[in-house]
Image: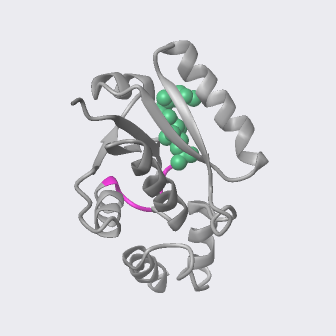
Amino acid sequence: MKETLAVYPGSFDPVTFGHLDILTRGLELFDKVIIAIAYNIEKQGLFTFEERKDLIQQSINGNNNVIIDSFDGLLIDYVKKVNARFVIRGLRAMSDFEYEFQMASINRTLNPEMDTLFMMTSKDYFFISSRTIKEVAAFHGSVTNFVPPPVERRLKEIFEKR
Ligand code: PNS
């Protein structure tokens, strides 16, 4: 039987418990999920692609149903390349909605065969974002409740030198 596949794209700079929550729930719907780290021209990013990939790898405990990859260019082209149809995105609050609605609509116009599935982030994580976590870590606040231990360690290393 053919395996079902979804793409979970994002910047993952760095991966958070919010991302992992969406991933876990995505794996209840699909046999395999590709975490696709996007090169974003508007976002410089704190971590390199290799680091982001590494941190995700260390945070998923060797789950064979997760593939970690990166892509450059349009998401629709990547989704086509890997022969997927569905994209998963997490929705935290109303503030995410407009941006996500816009993205999903553009993507669907560019490729009507692709569909975006939204999942509401669990209540424990709806206020977490990679951006706010980096800010907390930059000022030496605790991020234990927001990110997996490998990410916490790496954030500490980066910001203790600054
Ligand atoms: O984690 P993020 O930064 O919210 O993820 C946004 C992402 C990477 C999913 C989005 O920027 C994206 O799909 N980028 C690839 C370029 C693209 O396809 N743009 C057209 C849709 S606006």
Q: Quadrant of the N terminus?
A: top left
State the image coordinates of residue 47 (x, y, percent, origin top left). Answer: 40, 61
**Residue 58 appears in the figure:** yes
Q: Main secondary structure of the magenta part?
A: loop
User: Which residue, as the protein is rendered here, is positioned at the far front?
Assistant: 1
Viewer-nearest residue: 68 or 153: 68
User: Which residue, as the protein is rendered here, is positioned at the far right?
Assistant: 94
Viewer-nearest residue: 33 or 100: 33
Check the image and report above or below for 65 versus 151: above
The stretch of residues the image draws in magenta is 42-49
State the image coordinates of residue 69 (x, y, percent, origin top left). Answer: 29, 45
Check the image and report above or below for 151 versus 117: below
Q: Residue at x 51, y 54 (%)?
A: 22
Q: Quadrant of residue 123?
A: bottom right
Q: Residue at x 45, y 48 (%)?
A: 26
Whether 28 is among the magenta residues is: no
Check the image and report above or below for 117 versus 20: above
State the image coordinates of residue 75 (x, y, percent, origin top left). Answer: 44, 29
Horizontal side of 125 relative to 21 (left or right) equals right
State the image coordinates of residue 4 (x, y, percent, origin top left). Answer: 32, 34
Total labels drawn: 0
**Residue 42 appears in the figure:** no
Coloured how?
A: one colour
Q: Quadrant of residue 50?
A: bottom left
Check the image and report above or below for 47 versus 119: below
Q: Quadrant of residue 122?
A: bottom right
